[in-house]
Amino acid sequence: MLNNKLEEALNKQINAEFWSAYLYLSMSLNFENAGLTGIANWFKIQFQEEQAHAQIFMDYVNKRGGRVELQPIDAVPTKWDTPLSAFEDTLKHEKVVTSLINNLFALAEEVRDYASRDRIMWFVTEQVEEEDSANTLIEKLRRVGNDGMGLYLIDQELATRTYTAPAPLSGE
Ligand code: FEO
């Protein structure tokens, strides 16, 4: 059985993952409207990944005999004037998520739940990727500045991103 405090924290994290999904869906819609369909695609994949993160936690809580209680998802921003501002917000948000994941990891250790600690470890590694990909895109966008052709090429590149189910969901 899951420790009560940890079960509550995992439920909060499930809500946070859905909030992340909602945030990236909002960014995707924003850029779809702006005609930057490659960037919209990148955020749509991000939306799918965040739902997968929530699913991993939900599966885990269920497997451990815990109870998932879905809570309301807070409102998200709806407007970004530039791709750069959206990716800056992405990085800022992912840094917050990293600290949430680190706190969860510490709590699992505190209550000596090593199975949970192992599950959470996957997210610790995932957060390195999340921050790195946002950082890389911020650097690219800063480099192109106001160059329309540069932005066009980045949009083309991000159109190629496809969704792959994360390892814990694909049974790896
Ligand atoms: Fe669920 Fe973007 O981390």
Image: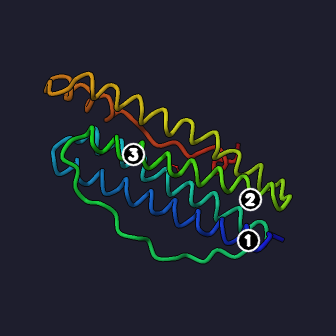
Question: Which of the pair 97/18 is nearer the observer?
Answer: 97
Q: Which residue is mark 2?
A: 107
Q: Residue at x 36, y 49 (%)?
A: 44
Is 97 left or right of 40, judged from the image as shown? right
User: Looking at numbered disc 3 in the image, what kind of residue is underneath it?
Assistant: Thr
User: Looking at numbered disc 2 in the image, what kind of residue is underneath it?
Assistant: Leu
Q: Which mark is residue 90?
A: 3
User: Looking at numbered disc 1 in the image, what kind of residue is underneath it?
Assistant: Lys
Does residue 126 lie above or below 67 as drawn? above
Q: Is disc 2 placed on a helix, strand or loop? A: helix
**Are the two marked residues, 3 and 1, in contact with CB atoms closer than 8 angstroms?**
no
- Which label's residue is closer to the chain start, 1 or 2? 1
Q: Residue at x 70, y 47 (%)?
A: 171
**Are the two marked residues, 1 and 2, in contact with CB atoms closer than 8 angstroms?**
yes
Q: Position of residue 25 (x, y in %)?
A: 35, 56
Question: Which of the pair 112/22 is nearer the observer?
Answer: 112
Q: Which mark is residue 5?
A: 1
Question: Which of the two discs, 2 and 3, sits closer to the camera?
Answer: 2
Quadrant hosting residue 59: bottom right
Q: Is disc 1 placed on a helix, strand or loop? A: helix
Give the alpha-carbon distance from disc 2 to disc 3, as whole Å: 26 Å
